[in-house]
Image (tube, helix red, strand yellow):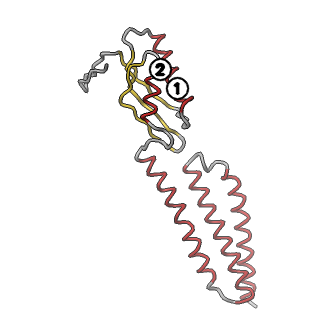
């Protein structure tokens, strides 16, 4: 009789845990794509929910059969199911740490489009990376006609921003464009930009 009471308690704890995890899943689900930390929290809660399902299933198997080995089998299956998600999360974290170019952003095409902006002669030192989940940045040196006014420069900066927003699937909320007049030579690199 003591075993059945323990199994009943096990079943109750599993159902209670599953209910709590389902509530947490609904809370975290809407934010999991925008932030790596939220995605990790979501995956943790999903794994906990799977663990609760395993506890409930184990209790349901133990009630009629008395076999408690199902718990170990269910735990192993859950562990195997966690591996691919953990690898994907690790892959995304490495991409952020290595400051890789965001997916869907072809820097050669970005350069071509930026160079089509009026008064832009060339674009060099073009870099794009993701500094945190959902936060891509882009930096570039932009060689412009040397006789431009400050108003012209402001117009060009707006056009460069518009170009990125209109032509590329990746939203880049933070950009840094360094405008350089044609013929400008950087003291640190001794490069002449024409």
Closest to the observer, 140 or 78 = 140
Q: Do residues under tags 2 and 1 come within 8 Å of each other at their CB atoms?
A: yes
Residue hosting label 2: 117
Residue 77: percent from left, percent from top: 58, 74
Crowding around mark 2 (Cα neighbors within 10 Å: few <14, some 14 to 19, many 20+) is some
Q: Which mark is residue 112?
A: none
Label 2 and label 1: CA atoms lie apart by 8 Å
**Residue pictured at 73% horizontal, 68% vertical:** 16
Residue hosting label 1: 163
- Looking at the rendering, which quadrant does residue 191 occupy? top left
**Residue pictured at 45% horizontal, 46% vertical:** 96
**Residue pictured at 61% horizontal, 65% vertical:** 47
74 up-or-down from 153: above or below: below
Looking at the image, residue 155 sits to the left or right of residue 97; the answer is: right
The local secondary structure at tag 2 comes to loop
Quarter of the image with the N terminus in it: bottom right
Quarter of the image with the C terminus in it: top left
The local secondary structure at tag 1 comes to helix
Q: Residue furthest left?
A: 190
Residue 119: percent from left, percent from top: 43, 15
Closest to the observer, 167 or 165 = 167
Crowding around mark 1 (Cα neighbors within 10 Å: few <14, some 14 to 19, many 20+) is some
Residue 3: percent from left, percent from top: 71, 88
């Amino acid at each position: 009789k003591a075993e059945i009471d323990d199994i009943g308690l096990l079943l109750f704890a599993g159902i209670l845990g599953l209910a709590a995890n389902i509530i947490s899943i609904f809370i975290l689900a809407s934010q999991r794509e925008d932030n790596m930390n939220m995605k990790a929290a979501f995956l943790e809660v999903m794994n906990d929910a799977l663990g609760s399902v395993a506890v409930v299933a184990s209790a349901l198997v133990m009630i009629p059969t008395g076999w408690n080995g199902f718990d170990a089998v269910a735990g192993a299956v859950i562990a195997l199911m966690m591996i691919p998600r953990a690898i994907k999360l690790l892959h995304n974290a490495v991409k952020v740490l290595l400051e890789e170019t965001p997916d869907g952003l072809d820097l050669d095409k970005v350069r071509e489009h930026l160079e089509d902006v009026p008064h832009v002669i060339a674009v060099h030192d073009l870099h794009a990376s993701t500094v945190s989940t959902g936060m891509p940045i882009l930096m570039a040196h932009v060689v412009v006609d040397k006789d431009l006014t400050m108003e012209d420069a402001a117009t060009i900066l707006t056009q460069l921003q518009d170009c990125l927003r209109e032509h590329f699937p990746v939203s880049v909320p933070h950009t840094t464009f360094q405008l350089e007049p044609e013929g400008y030579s950087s003291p640190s690199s001794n490069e002449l930009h024409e």
